[in-house]
Amino acid sequence: MPLVQGLALQARNLRKRFAGEDVVCGVDLGIAAGECFGLLGPNGAGKTTTLKLCLGLIEPDEGSARLLGLEVPAHAREARARVGVVPQFDNLDPDFTVAENLVVYGRYFGLGDAAIRARIPQLLEFAGLQGRAAARIQTLSGGMKRRLTLARALVNDPQLLFMDEPTTGLDPQARHLIWERLRHLMQQGKTLVLTTHFMEEAERLCTRLAIMDRGRIIVTGSPRALIAEHIESQVVEVHGPGLEAWMARARSLAPRLERAGETVFCYAADVEPVIADLRRQPELVYLHRPANLEDVFLKLTGRDLRD
């Protein structure tokens, strides 16, 4: 991939081996300023290592990366001063209050206490934590801690925000609040890069995404484009007694069937023949829905469990 001006992040032919095993195998990325880019993949696909290479936290065996116009890892420190990072697990300091966590973190960027404290009301409002500045971390719920971790990543007013599974472990209310806050950041022109195992999250937030498996990027595109390209438009999920016998007939009703455990997935542009047949099978339970990004993900990476 040739160098392109104006990209917030560009990686070219990134490769990394650990203990003789290829973890990242020739990854190319180009992320435009102002977009939300998702990096998806099963456990062990190489996502975290790729992000570390792009942040200049580890050196590639081959290839190069530019972060906000700066070569990394050669100029990683300067680049990271303009970047925010939301780790997968909250690492807030339990010995400090909410406000003190923000002040201490801001000092890592060379910010003065007065400048940080001037930003605290805005950051707490963003996180929905108004009135909690003096609260101890132990008194916060899991959703509050996650929102504080997101606010903390914004203390230096970064141009680009890396997020590693930002809504893991959150209830639906907290997840939707964080989605709303992230959309607000995009409206401000921030660039977002996230990894997530929630396909709904990627489908809602990402302007583009890449699916990665076994160290390689296998597809890139917008969620809608990937769904249209790789999956039939309709899905019927079927389970219940008599599934085996019904499957033999179902193969003539839908162009593609997949089985995962005790559930059969029927994929077709027109699923009315499948549904009409299922109405005559009261022992079977079915769900009819449009195809989504999770269907694409499972088709391209497989349904086998990854540890």
Image: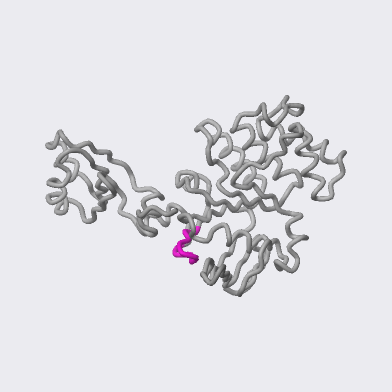
- Rendered location of residue 233, percent (x, y): 31, 50
- Rendered location of residue 238, percent (x, y): 23, 42
- 227 to the left or right of 37: left
In the displayed structure, 136 sits above or below 150; it is: above
- Colour scheme of this structure image? one colour
Q: Is residue 228 magenta?
A: no
Q: Of 252 and 73, which appears nearest the observer? A: 73
- 143 to the left or right of 291: right
At x 64%, y 57%, the residue is: 33
Q: Of 159 and 145, which appears nearest the observer? A: 145
Q: Residue 240: name its quadrant.
A: top left
Q: Quadrant of the N terminus?
A: bottom right
- Rendered location of residue 57, percent (x, y): 68, 61
In the displayed structure, 12 sits above or below 134; it is: below
At x 26%, y 53%, the residue is: 258
The chief SS type of the magenta part is strand
Residue range (magenta): 210-219
- 65 to the left or right of 204: right
At x 76%, y 55%, the residue is: 81
Q: Residue 148: name its quadrant.
A: top right
At x 51%, y 69%, the residue is: 21
- 46 to the left or right of 185: left
Q: Of 69 and 237, which appears nearest the observer? A: 237
In the displayed structure, 118 sits above or below 50; it is: above
